[in-house]
Amino acid sequence: MSKKDNIYADQLEQVESFNFDQKVVEVFPDMIKRSVPGYTAIIDGIGQLAKKYTQANSSVYDLGCSLGAATLSIREAVNDESCQIIAVDNSTAMIERCKLIQSGYNFSMPVEMVEADINDLDFKNASFVVLNFTLQFLPREQRQTLLNNIYQGLNPGGALVLSEKLTMSSEELDASIINIHHDFKKQNGYSDMEIAQKRAALENVLIPDTREQHYQRFENAGFKQFDTWFQHYNFASFIAVK
Ligand SMILES: C[S@@+](CC[C@H](N)C(=O)[O-])C[C@H]1O[C@@H](n2cnc3c(N)ncnc32)[C@H](O)[C@@H]1O
Ligand SMILES: O=C(O)C(=O)C[C@]1(C(=O)O)C=C[C@@H](O)C=C1
């Protein structure tokens, strides 16, 4: 069981930039479920999409896997021992806990957990790639190159699932949806102070793009088909097929 997220519950003298350290690892499942509308539905959907797109004898990548929730959903849904999942995160604390969690499950699909920067990977023989709320943490100038690398490593017919917090198309709409997201957090037990301090911690760390920016990157990378398969408020998940 994950502990309750109370990282921002007390007033902090100085709010430091958000990072995926041990403190976050301890509360992560609770934090992400109470912060990201539709998170559980997206994790389930990733399993279903993986079932559709994963090819025999190929690799599946879970990039910025954190504790491996998407990996677990894919292992359960696909369960094909001819494929392998490569789950990657550059946080030592996350990947260590991820290994512990995954070892508690017995699915036939082999999983390799790697501590690495996803910008340094050489994608090969991939049929399904997941970026579930990870791209938003990369500096903007790294995002296109990563998508290009993924596209190059995908087999024909393979797919990328990209989930992100979005900026809405007009300032007015953006402010209004951000408000509704904050109400969602309040309904999940976060106080106004927790919400404000988390927002300050994420400033310049989680940098959201618009849907149009994501679509443009898919197009630039070479993807011919892409669409939004899920959205709840300003949190969306896209699928792009090679
Ligand atoms: C919001 S979490 C992802 C949640 C996870 N995919 C899930 O479905 O539960 C973002 C993760 O990306 C990782 N990350 C950020 N930048 C990275 C990079 N350059 N290389 C590898 N991992 C990265 C962070 O350490 C963090 O664990
Ligand atoms: O946007 C927010 O307020 C969030 O808390 C979102 C978000 C995310 O999208 O990754 C940010 C950090 C944590 O990993 C969990 C959720």
Image: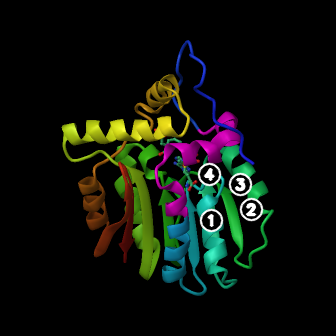
Q: Residue 71 got which mark?
A: 1
Q: Is residue 28 magenta?
A: yes
Write down the residue under mark 4: 66
Residue 20 is situated, as x and y percent measured from the top left of the image, at 60, 39
Residue 86 seen from this side: no
Kind of element beneath mark 2: helix
The amino acid pointed to by label 4 is: Ser
Write the start and end of the magenta stretch as one range: 20-43
Q: Are marks 2 and 4 in contact (CB under 8 Å)?
A: no
Give the CA separation, mark 3 to mark 1.
10 Å
Q: Nearer the viewer, residue 144 or 227?
A: 227
Q: CA distance from mark 4 to mark 3?
A: 7 Å
Amino acid bearing label 2: Gln
- Mark 1 and mark 2 in contact? Answer it, CB < 8 Å: yes
Inter-mark Cα distance, 1 to 4: 10 Å
| Image quarter (top left, top right, bottom left or bottom right) of the C terminus | bottom left
Q: Are marks 2 and 3 in contact (CB under 8 Å)?
A: yes
In the rendered structure, are the residues bearing label 1 and label 4 in contact, judged by CB atoms less than 8 Å apart?
no
Q: Which mark is residue 102?
A: 2
Reading the image, the residue beneath label 3 is 98
Measured Cα–Cα span from mark 2 to mark 4? 12 Å
Residue at horizontal 59 percent and vertical 56 percent from the top: 65
Q: Is mark 4 within 8 Å of ligand 1?
A: yes
Residue 1 on image: x %, y % = 75, 48
Contact, mark 3 vs mark 1 (Cβ under 8 Å): yes
Is 26 located above or below residue 53 in the figure? above
Which callout, 3 or 1, points at the residue further toward the start of the chain? 1
